[in-house]
Image: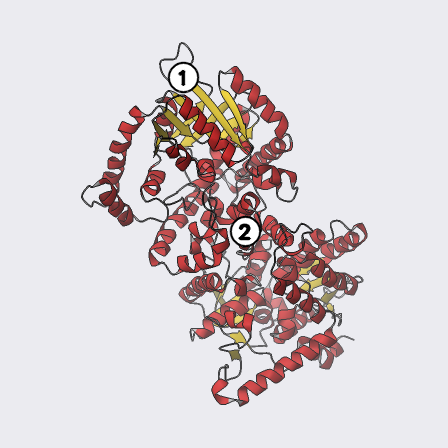
Amino acid sequence: MPEIKTQDFSAASIAAINDPKLRRALDRVASGFEVARLDRVAEATPEVWEDWRQQARDIKEHTIEHLDYYLDLLYTNVTAAGGHLHFAKDADQANEIVAHIAQTRGVKVATKSKSMVSEELGLNPVLEAVGVEVWETDLGEYIIQLAEETPSHLVAPALHKSKEDVAELFSEKLGIPYDEDIYHMAATAREVLRDKFMEADLGISGANFIVAETGTLVIITNEGNGRLSTSAPRIHIGITGMEKVIPSMQDLSIFLRLLPQSATGQRITSYVSMITGPRRSDDEDGPEEFHLVLVDNGRSNMLADPALREALYCIRCGACLNICPIYARVGGHAYGWVYPGPIGAVVTPMLVGLKRAKELPQASSLCGACREVCPIKIDIPRMLLDLRKKTAESPDKNLRSAPRIERVLASLYVRLMSGPKLLGMAIRFGRLLQKTERIIPFFSPMTKDGKWIRKAPLPLLSRWTRSRDLPTLPKQTFHDIWNKELSRDDS
Amino acid sequence: MTQNANISADLYVTCVIDQLYPEVGVSVVKVLRRLGVTVGFPKEQTCCGQPVYNSGFSKDARTLAKRVLQQFRDSEYVVVPSGSCAATLRVFYLELFAEDPDLLVQAKALSAKTYEFSEFLVNVLKVEDASACGATHQGTVTYHPSCHLMRELGVKSEPKKLLSTVPGLEEKELAGAEICCGFGGTFSVKFPHISEGMVADKIANVQASGADTLVACDMSCLMNMAGALNRQGSDIKVRHLAQILDSESD
């Protein structure tokens, strides 16, 4: 698996916020996707859209509840079509399977179409270690491969890069003159990659869906690279998570609409490729071998947990990233692993361990915008809350990792709120503190009118007053006013 | 006004209003009374438990929630001038007590009679026109729909309906209205660098709206936005919907 940096979320997010280039890139791109998505919702009408979401959710729920059955059916049908289905329990096993196929078949060059699961596995370095030259052929993935970076968005992996960044990168890595014209840059990438498609012995793809009843791998792309990667080389390996299986071709239709419309606002992607087994004897082209590697790598943990199971319904459209005000500020890399944004804050702790990624579920205002845009109606805020609960009070010590101080503060808070008497005393004490602070002139943290605290001297509140004023405690609480004046009005 | 003479409602005032903005509570009581509602105030009330619930300490949250269940057991209606706290009573308590059948019955009873202030006015009291509350407002107002109000309670049109019928009030559109203001309870102090960026975006939109007053149904979100506005020396006023409807408090 690639390096896990989830424990550095706070530091990484601060660095991201202070990066003006990232800010501009995030402002430009993510909001464009959301505007386009809203156009599609309006076009379908909100009622129909809602109906599609429910249908899609029902299919996912049904499949995940009967995952063993559908995986079994898939195995039967992939095999019947002449393909090979491999199950990998973790990243090492998946990488080993792919490396073994490459080595035993004398593979020298591999082209890849976009696959987030292969990012999750950290497949490229493993293949390179056994002497395979690996080429990312999705334009965004190609850019970040050249830059030796990781994706920062589920569908737009190089979202964090401006066209100027890419022009510089191409100039430096490909030894061509600096040219920030997007069409020219795309043409350059096409020229480089076209040769590789012809050279490659192995094509690697992800899968957006796998259809159990036919054993078909479905990928949707816009660049045509997916089709070239899966048809030109003599071997095709599809790699994906085991949750991507759906029962039937009929079920597929709803997802072919919902995924692109939620992801980029496109009615449908430029290419929809359905691949069933290797080439038949009467096919003119296509790979001689077809392998499908289905990865668990922690997904069973989600499956086993009713509170988090629906995270497996995710179709990786990225709509929740595009709407998320946190993602919009910190970008994808701050999340510290492959899957960023709201869904990443749920999935990552389940795949890399909650202890290491305990900050991710906390880094949310629980505003719920992600749930509103999710095409599968995944209740992300509830799952974030569940992960917080596990962090705070799970009996399992591998999960429970809230700082002791938080636990102490929570129980002190409950004690304080155990009745209005104690609370009233605390408030009176607070008012007293406010007064003393006004007496000491050069330590006065308040505005002249006494209504606002400019610089709170207490640990947590001082974080609030970094950029915001805090209201001071007024002379009376509502309890006081009720007792003195309001309660008598009712007769 | 007697059309609601048979309705009695108990006020769950919320911590933020009780301790920082008691004048908002006063406006809520006045508006409800003008509409003929008999208003009660169970005095033992404190916090609903949301801050600890949102931090994952559900046992602690249950301790506080049980107090609320107890105090409002006999209420006909519970009115909460906060979308967030109303969502806690109405939605989150059902999750908090999902595995305790006895308390779940009580939580369901509380849930069924709990209303956020604006929806109580529009959907229970059937207020069609804000002038029925005695509201007038000379000036321009922009409205921030708070997240829990919109997305946990589904209250979207009610506050707008009330504002649009206040005589003299001119509404200004708020760009990016449905984007979170960045408060998020403890989130605001756990990740201040993210939270303050969010509120900076929000108040930039508030200022761009051209309104002289910012209105919402949650004082905690308003405290966040007011704190940021004040730090920037803005003179935009910040009001709870109840204060606009009360009018006298200005």
* Residue A140 versus residue A203 in the image, above or below: below
Amino acid type at image mark 2: Arg
* Circle nearer the viewer, 2 or 1: 2
Q: Is residue A185 left or right of residue B22?
A: left
Residue drawn 54% across the image and 25% down it: A250
Please provide percent x and percent y for residue A61.
Answer: 61, 35
Label 1 secondary element: loop
Q: Chain of mark 1?
A: A
Q: How is the image coloured?
A: secondary structure
Amino acid type at image mark 1: Glu
**Res. A356 mark:** 2
Q: Using a 10 Å C-alpha cutoff, classify the residue at mark 1 as few (fewer than 14 neighbours), some (14 to 19) or many (20 or more).
A: some
User: What separation in Å lies between label 2 and label 1 (alpha carbons)?
Assistant: 43 Å
In this orientation, which residue lies closer to the viewer: A349 or B239? A349
**Res. A211 mark:** none
Residue drawn 72% across the image and 76% down it: A422
Residue drawn 71% across the image and 81% down it: A485
* Residue A276 versus residue A384 in the image, above or below: above
Please provide percent x and percent y for residue A460.
Answer: 55, 70
* Residue A369 versus residue A123 in the image, above or below: below
Residue picked out by circle 1? A288
Farthest-out residue, front: A130
Label 2 secondary element: loop
Is residue B139 visible in the rendered image? The answer is: no
